[in-house]
Image (spheres, rainbow, N blue to C red):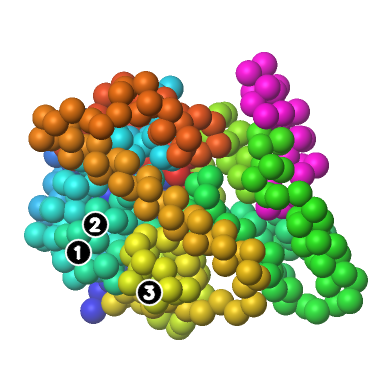
Amino acid sequence: MPTSIAILGASGMVGSSLAAQLLRSQLLEPGDRLQLAGHGSQETEAKLLGTRIDLLDAFDEGRVEVEVVPRLADLNADIVIVAAGVGMSAACTNRRDMGFANRAVFEEIAEQCALHVPNSLFIVVSNPVELAVHILCEKLDRKRVFGMGAQQDSLRFARAVADDLGISRRDLRASVLGEHGQAMVPLWSSVELMAHTPGLLRSLDLLAARSLEIPLQNRVRIVQDEVTQFLRDERVAEAYEATRRALPDVRIFVEPFITAHTMHSTPNATSNAILQCIAAALAGDRRRIHGQVKLEGEFAGLHGTCGVPVTLSREGWHAESLNGLTPLEQDLLHDSAASIREFLSLVLDAEASKDSAISPKVSPASDTQERNRLSSIQPGQQPTSNRSSWQDGSEASSGIAGLGT
């Protein structure tokens, strides 16, 4: 049977980049389908129609059918990539702030997908990915909903470590679990070299030992403060240089913040991580990847949405064990899961209060302070407007996934 993959948010930077990388990868065979999904507006449909012709002009040798799907009700896909929602802006400066803007969009997507494609595999790109996964799982089979943020973070960590060791990222594996955001947990114990040469092993042990000298949170804060000052003065080169001097586990927190400042999105890196998830699902060969999923005790006794190692197939995800976690890493992972739960409660409870016209339990000032405390690297601001529906959701020029990647 032909394979069909749909991209929700295909008119955004990440969605359009993914479409091109997917066709270039040849994961889809002749007769397979790629659906570019819109949200009912004529403007978006017109852009997608143009995007379709551009993709066919570039990749028609593969004979993949590229279709424009104007409405979610017309979806018919084996794999649905959820890359739609409000992206980065002056009002949404980090992943967590996007939760207040994107909750209604995620709910509309969940409702429509539950009606029309409930048996698809859903790969979530939109941010905050934990919120999107949680909301989709309320309407869909949780084992069919997978957020790709942890895979992106793991690839970043692997690249950073490989760079310090002077090798290629393909020569090692590494894992980042927990949140796709400030509470993510890079695991030094997970770093695995493909070639066990004594010199590389000694260098890796030295990096891991140095990471224990000062708590990660403190090291991130020091570099973040330096980078923030550079960015205020638009000294981007100096900001990147400041991260280069830091250890790999710090760089994966701060480098994306600089990139978001300059680009508002990370379309190429994000598309590559999504592509790895799609390849794993299509192959079904139990290769280990990482993703945010809704757990019921399958990994480390965790419950709720959290990034963990998994295998992926068209039928859904399966949690995988990860041996050798240190007691500190286990504590950090449970702290991250608790932070995610707290954030989800904040967003969902705030919206519930608004919907029922009940006054919030905290004053606007203290509510803002709480969101700032929970937000990722740079303290966030209250979004200037909340999008009330999928139809009103913005696939802004700043990019569908924004910093979420």
Tell me the crowding category of disc 3: few under 14, some 14 to 19, or many 20 or more residues within 10 angstroms, Cα based.
Answer: few
Residue 60 point in image, percent of width and height: 37, 57
Residue for point 43% across, 28% down: 369
Q: Which residue is mark 1?
A: 140
Residue for point 64% across, 77% down: 324
The answer to whether residue 98 is visible is yes
Residue 233 lies in magenta, yes or no? Answer: yes
Q: Which residue is mark 2?
A: 136
Question: Could you tell me if the residues under marks 2 and 3 are in contact, i.e. CB atoms within 8 Å?
Answer: no
Residue for point 71% across, 35% down: 222
Residue 180 — which label? none
Residue 239 lies in magenta, yes or no? Answer: yes
Residue 298 point in image, percent of width and height: 39, 76
- Spatial distance from mark 3 to mark 1, Cα to Cα? 19 Å
- Spatial distance from mark 1 to mark 2, Cα to Cα? 6 Å
Kindly report the secondary structure that dominates the magenta region of the rendered protein.
Answer: helix
Would residue 364 be found to the left or right of residue 177 on screen?
Answer: left
Region of the chain picked out in magenta, as a range: 225-250
Q: Which residue is mark 3?
A: 297
Label 1 sits on what residue type? Leu
Label 3 sits on what residue type? Gly
Quarter of the figure with the N terminus: bottom left
Would residue 138 be found to the left or right of residue 314 on screen?
Answer: left
